[in-house]
Amino acid sequence: QDHPEKITTELSPSASGSLHNNKSVILTDFNDTVLNNIDRNILLNNVSSTSSIAKLDFYKQTGINHVGGWIKNENNFSDYITTDKKYGADMNFDENIETEQQQHQQKYEAPVDIVLAADIICKPSDAVAAANTIYDALKPGGQAVVVCADAKHRFGVDLFESECKRVGLTLDCATNVADLYDGTLLVPSSTSGQGIDKGRNGNNRGKNNMQQTCGYVEGMKLTLFMMHKP
């Protein structure tokens, strides 16, 4: 398939300070090689107690799961569509509720409080799938932060805002990254070595140098979207 990387990081189950409160981080991707590399990094950095990986295919998500939780990848639930958001606050509690909850847990990953994502849209259908996935993955009241390149460099980004509104996400802001911190996040690279900040060991590390980021090209505009699920 041609959508190897999707929602990149989910934090669960608290908002700010998740790791400091002994909460968990879930790193997701669709590509098995990427997931294996992430898993190795988790082990190398000794953060396996708070970090885990999960395979996520955002083309399987529906964008209608109000209570939250994305469809698991190991099973094919593409034909399972809830026509009403029966797992939300309006669920009727009866003798079948335990069975329904168990079925829900078998089909869906647990919802999260925060979704962090970057460079997840490369074509128009990605914008639809990304919005669906963010809505489904979040708990009600959950928040998402997404960074995307402009539509000139990533087709479909211009549709993302409307797709988020379609599924019921509330857009809190859409900010040009160049306007943040007086533009210091997008300082041009230095070809001569001058102006390069030195690390503790004296190594050149290129302070605030976005041009060293994989996929970034000169002239690319980055937009930071912040949204929440009512």
Image (cartoon, rainbow, N blue to C red):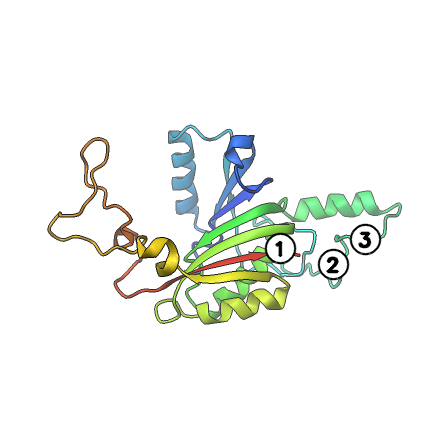
Local crowd size for mark 1, using a 10 Å CA cut-off: few (<14), some (14–19), many (≥20):
many
Q: Earlier in the sequence, mark 2 or mark 3?
A: 2
Residue 176 horizontal/vertical position (percent): 40, 62
To which residue does mark 3 refer?
Answer: 91
To which residue does mark 2 refer?
Answer: 85
Q: Earlier in the sequence, mark 3 or mark 1?
A: 3
Residue 228 horizontal/vertical position (percent): 59, 55
Q: Quick one: SS at disc 2?
A: loop
Q: Please indicate whether residue 74 sits to the left or right of residue 95 in the image.
A: left
Does residue 70 appear anywhere in the picture?
Answer: no
To which residue does mark 1 refer?
Answer: 136
Q: Earlier in the sequence, mark 1 or mark 2?
A: 2
Asked whether the residues under the numbered discs 2 and 3 touch, taking CB atoms below 8 Å apart as contact, a structural biologist would say: no
User: CA separation, marks 2 and 3?
Assistant: 8 Å
Res. 83 image quadrant: bottom right
Q: Which mark is residue 2?
A: none
Check the image and name the residue furthest to the right.
95
User: CA separation, marks 3 and 1?
Assistant: 17 Å
158 to 148, vertically: above or below: below
**Which amino acid is tagged 3?**
Met
Q: Quick one: SS at disc 3?
A: loop
Q: Give the quadrant of the C terminus.
A: bottom right
Tell me the residue at 23%/31% (across/down). 200
